[in-house]
């Protein structure tokens, strides 16, 4: 197209030049005066030539811009592909290194186990193991591998009042809706609890049954996960809740939403509390599924204890009883079994206990 335009321009130029040449040949240029019609015609030809040149220039500029844009897009595409390839290579290398590290640790542990098995018991020297978990103290809170731990060993400050954790609340709401779709009704019996509320709850238990019995299922003030805002008591806090449709659904599905049964059955000596099928703790989906699949409680996974005697400022049951003005043992205990059963029947229901909707 551009070549045709250029050819037309040249033809017009030749035409004008030819006409001017014929005029020059026949006339004396010093005396030639173009008529108005000839001047108008010459000007028309010149304007046509300029118009065609401008059109040709615009097309050339447009073509060059298009080519430049295509080149820029190709360069950007090449750079993006290079960056993605480098990212994939780095990710694959990290994955390989991680797998190698895990395999090496597993192999080392196996070798150590085998060597210990082959060594006679009397010649084995006990050596302190290097800590596998990172424990941090932040403003009176204890984090193990970045996870907040609250139990009989590790407490929270009296003025720690974060309220309910928003992520935990959102996860419970989602779980509650999904359970409802399955025909199961779940609700929060007890959630966030302040230090003072926990103090009153524990005091009532200790007053009625003694500190020794209260320590089995109720947390001392400052040692309750409820104060951390990360746990819920679901539906009923009676032992009769175990085995119900709601309890079975909760145990089977809570890890899908980031919760664990905090005090599972068979782990009482490790957690320090009786089995509570209603008490769930929010830890995130990934960790919850890992703990559930491996049948581990939080203390086992983090490698920590749950014992008031191992706390930073340990308080024995005798000292706690003296502080509260209560007894260590059951104040209502009597010698006659019948009288004991009659007295105790107001507190227990098939081995459970009533906490007026508070839980542990």
Image (cartoon, rainbow, N blue to C red):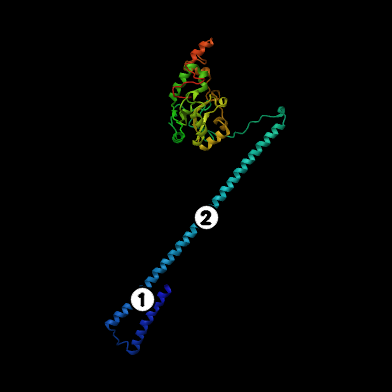
Q: Cα distance, mark 2 to mark 1?
A: 48 Å
Q: Position of residue 169 (x, y in %)?
A: 44, 34
Residue in the picture at 42% in, 72% down? 2
> Where does the image place residue 196, in percent across and percent down from the top left?
43, 24
Furthest toward the top, the residue is 336
Res. 219 in view = no
Chain-order first, disc 2 or disc 1: 1
The residue singled out by tag 1 in the image is 49
Can you tell which quarter of the image residue 163 is in? top left
Q: Residues within 10 Å of mark 1 (few under 14, many from 20)?
A: some
| Near-viewer residue (88 or 268) | 268
- Please tell me which residue is depicted at 49% across the width and 57% down the height of the picture: 77
Residue 200 position in % (x across, y down): 44, 21
> Relative to residue 88, is residue 336 depicted above or below?
above
Toward which corner of the image does residue 193 lie, by quadrant?
A: top left
Q: Say which residue appears at 36% left-offset and 76% top-offset.
A: 49
Taking the spot 47% from the left edge, 62% from the top edge, the residue there is 71
């Amino acid at each position: 197209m551009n070549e045709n335009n250029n050819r037309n321009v040249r033809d017009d130029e030749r035409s004008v030049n030819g006409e001017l040449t014929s005029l020059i040949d026949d006339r004396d240029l010093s005396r030639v005066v173009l008529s108005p019609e000839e001047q108008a015609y010459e000007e028309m030809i010149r304007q046509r030539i300029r118009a065609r040149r401008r059109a040709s220039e615009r097309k050339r500029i447009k073509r060059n811009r298009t080519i430049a844009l295509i080149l820029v897009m190709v360069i950007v595409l090449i750079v993006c592909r290079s960056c993605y390839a480098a990212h994939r290579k780095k990710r694959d290398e990290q994955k390989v290194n991680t797998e190698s590290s895990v395999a090496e640790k597993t192999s080392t542990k196996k070798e150590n186990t085998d060597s210990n098995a082959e060594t006679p018991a009397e010649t084995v020297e006990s050596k302190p193991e290097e800590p596998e978990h990172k424990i941090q103290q932040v403003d009176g809170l204890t984090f193990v591998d970045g996870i907040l731990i609250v139990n009989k060993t590790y407490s929270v400050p009296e003025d720690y009042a974060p309220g309910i954790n928003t992520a935990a609340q959102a996860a419970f709401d989602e779980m509650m809706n999904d359970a409802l779709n399955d025909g199961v009704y779940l609700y929060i019996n007890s959630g966030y609890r302040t230090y003072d509320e926990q103090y009153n709850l524990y005091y009532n238990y200790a007053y009625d049954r003694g500190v020794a019995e209260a320590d089995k299922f109720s947390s001392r003030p400052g040692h309750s996960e409820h104060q951390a805002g990360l746990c819920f008591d679901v539906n009923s806090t009676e032992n009769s809740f175990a085995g119900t449709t709601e309890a079975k659904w909760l145990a089977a599905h809570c890890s899908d939403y980031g919760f664990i049964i905090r005090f599972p059955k068979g782990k009482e000596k490790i957690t320090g509390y009786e089995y509570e099928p209603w008490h769930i703790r929010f830890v995130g989906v990934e960790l919850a599924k890992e703990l559930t699949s491996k049948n581990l409680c939080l203390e086992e996974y983090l490698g920590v204890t749950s014992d008031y005697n191992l706390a930073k400022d340990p308080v024995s049951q005798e000292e706690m009883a003296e502080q509260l003005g209560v007894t260590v043992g059951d104040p209502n205990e009597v010698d006659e079994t019948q009288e004991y059963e009659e007295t105790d029947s107001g507190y227990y229901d098939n081995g459970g206990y009533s906490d007026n909707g508070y839980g542990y």
